[in-house]
Amino acid sequence: MRADRPEITGAPDPAGLPTPAGLPDSTERAARPDCPSLCLVCGFDYRDQPPADWPWGPAGTDPSFGFCVCCGTEFGYADATLAGSRRARKAWAEGGHRWHDPAARSENFDPAEQLKALPDRIR
Ligand SMILES: [Zn+2]
């Protein structure tokens, strides 16, 4: 190891990549093996879709690079880290929880209720 590079330590993430130790939250990869059908930004649940179409695939480790029908997040970019997901969620809220695809909006959509689906570690 070269002395001018930080040592990468820590538990591997589900994709098998090492988690850099001691780095700020913004670099924490937003792995989601516990909730692969959820958009980590808005909590929309894709479980009625084929798993291959879920935000980060059936294992929650490989972004589809599709766009969330609800919040418009492109999976694999803004939601690649937990901090990025939180920032995108804040922007979505400040924009009035607008739907990317209004035709997909359910009549009883309640953003607060939908966001309850997210695990605490992602809020
Ligand atoms: Zn979303």
Image: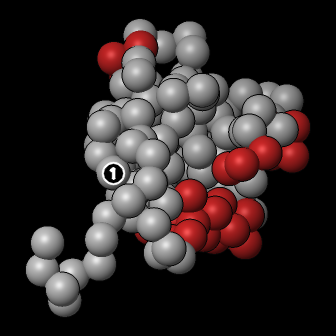
Near mark 1 (Cα within 10 A), the count class, few <14, some 14-19 or many ≥20, is few
**Residue located at (49% from left, 60% from top):** 28
Q: Along the horizontal axis of the image, is 30 left or right of 94?
A: left
**Residue located at (29% from left, 78% from top):** 6
Q: Position of residue 111 (x, y in %)?
A: 80, 45
Query: Which residue ends up furthest to the bottom in the rendered image?
Result: 4
Amino acid on which disc 1 is placed: Pro
Can you see residue 73? no
Which quadrant of the view contains residue 52?
Answer: top left
Please, is residue 57 above or below residue 10 in the view? above
Q: Position of residue 85 (x, y in %)?
A: 56, 58
Please, is residue 73 above or below residue 27 in the view? above
For mark 1, what is the residue? 18
Q: Position of residue 80 (x, y in %)?
A: 42, 55
Query: Which residue ends up furthest to the left in the rendered image?
Result: 2
**How are the residues colored?**
secondary structure
**Residue located at (41% from left, 22% from top):** 59
Q: Position of residue 41 (x, y in %)?
A: 60, 51
In front here: 37 or 44?
37
Secondary structure of residue under mark 1 = loop
Can you see residue 44? yes
In front here: 61 or 98?
61
Please, is residue 106 above or below residue 116 in the view? above
- Mark 1 within 8 Å of ligand 1, using the beta carbon: no
Which quadrant of the view contains residue 39?
Answer: top right
The quadrant the N terminus occupies is bottom left
